[in-house]
Image (cartoon, rainbow, N blue to C red):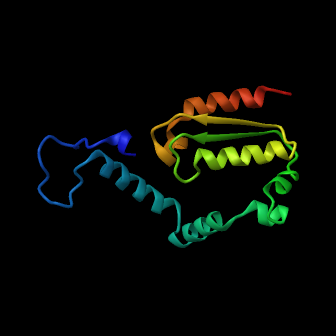
Amino acid sequence: MGEKFGRRLRKDELPEGILETQFEIESYLKYQGEAFVERFDANSYLYITRAMDYYDAASQWGRGDLVQACRRIKSRLMVVSFSTDWLYPPAHCRDFAFALCRAGQSVTYVEVPSRYGHDSFLVETKPVGHLLRHFLEDKS
């Protein structure tokens, strides 16, 4: 996020109140926060994030072995990571892709360079669209 917005002020003059939106990043976060509460109930979000944090495919489907869990998959896969994503770091995505390979799965792995952290999937739409288009058009 810092790379995207830096320390750009929204206006040339200083704000009147200390809590008034001063930086572009604050404006972006305020907008995203307001849009978010319109789409999600706070309790639903807590349950969704808890489910994401605790989900473990290796335990659920492979008795603790991710390779075993990956053997259940019946399709080609593409794993896409973003170089600066802190929530789903490239190293974890590569580990998943390697487990898929060891399970005999057809997998394509791509790391997209980006400076936008976890928000990369919202920003890097052109390179991801290009990757998806070629992946889906490939009939092999």
| Residue at 83% from the left image edge and 37% from the top image edge | 106
- Which image quarter: residue 112? top right
Horizontal and vertical percent for residue 68? 86, 56
* Viewer-nearest residue: 37 or 21: 21
The location of residue 21, given as percent across then percent down, is 24, 53
In the image: residue 108, left or right of residue 53: right
Which percent across, then down, holds residue 101?
A: 81, 42
**Frontmost residue, 39 versus 91:** 91
Q: Residue furthest bottom?
A: 43
Q: Is residue 93 above or below residue 135?
A: below
Q: Above or below — where is 125 with respect to 85?
A: above
Location of residue 7 with respect to 126 vertically, above or below: below
The quarter of the rendered structure image containing the C terminus is top right
Q: Residue at x 76, y 60 (%)?
A: 57
- All told, the count of numbered labels is 0
Q: Nearer the viewer, residue 98 or 61?
A: 98
Residue at 85 percent across and 42 percent down: it is 105
The residue at 65%/35% (across/down) is 110
Q: Give the side of residue 14 with respect to residue 31, left or right.
A: left
The one of 27 and 100 positioned closer to us in this rendering:
100
Q: Quadrant of residue 54?
A: bottom right
